[in-house]
Amino acid sequence: MSNAHHGAHVPARATLPMSVANMTFLVNKLGEDCAPLQFVRELTQNGIEAVVQQGSPGEVVWDVAWHHFDLDGTYKLACIDTGAGMTGPEMGNYHLDVVGSNGRGSRRCQRRSAR
């Protein structure tokens, strides 16, 4: 029997990174556990935290995502902040943190940051 079955410690360097093949599916599944307007609170709070992290005055704005309307005539809601943004790798780690917390943390929804 392998040592993993006996609770042996596996060194961190031996741990493989996790990835998600279908991020839309993941976000939708996590959203099923949220109250209907939970995303409003989460995106607003994430935007506020990003502005505070930046350390200078900023704003969090809710508006229509006009570029979507211009493309196909659909109205989509956008939450845009002027706070510290995330790089691609940071965004991937952020989503893995959400998965790892089983969606129970306060940062359950994506946020977009204007740079």
Image (cartoon, rainbow, N blue to C red):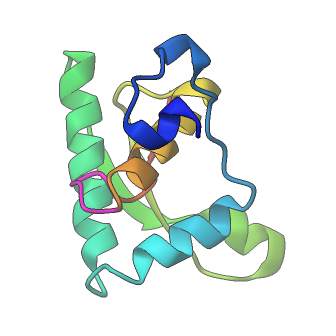
Q: Tell whether 3 sits left or right of 104.
A: right
* Residue, far front: 1
Magenta stretch containing residue 91, yes or no? no
* Residue, far right: 71
Front-most of residues 22 and 41: 22
Relative to 64, does residue 85 appear above or below in the rendering? above
Tell me where residue 39 sits by quadrant.
bottom left
Residue ID at (65%, 67%): 24
Task: Give how far across and how far down residue 25 sits, in percent.
Answer: 64, 72
Residue ID at (50%, 31%): 3
**Res 97 visible:** yes
Q: Tell whether 34 sits left or right of 95.
A: left
Q: Tell whether 67 sits left or right of 96.
A: right
Magenta stretch containing residue 106, yes or no? yes
Residue ID at (34%, 62%): 103
Front-most of residues 94 and 36: 94
Magenta-highlighted residues? 103-107
Query: Magenta stretch mostly in which secondary structure?
Result: loop
Task: Give how far across and how far down residue 9 sits, in percent.
Answer: 40, 23
Task: Give how far across and how far down residue 68 sits, in percent.
Answer: 70, 68
Relative to 78, does residue 100 appear above or below in the rendering? above
Relative to 73, does residue 27 appear above or below in the rendering? above
Front-most of residues 14 and 89: 14
Tell me where residue 55 sits by quadrant.
top left
Residue ID at (75%, 55%): 21
Relative to 22, does residue 72 appear above or below in the rendering? below
* Residue, far bottom: 36
Q: Quadrant of the N terminus?
A: top right
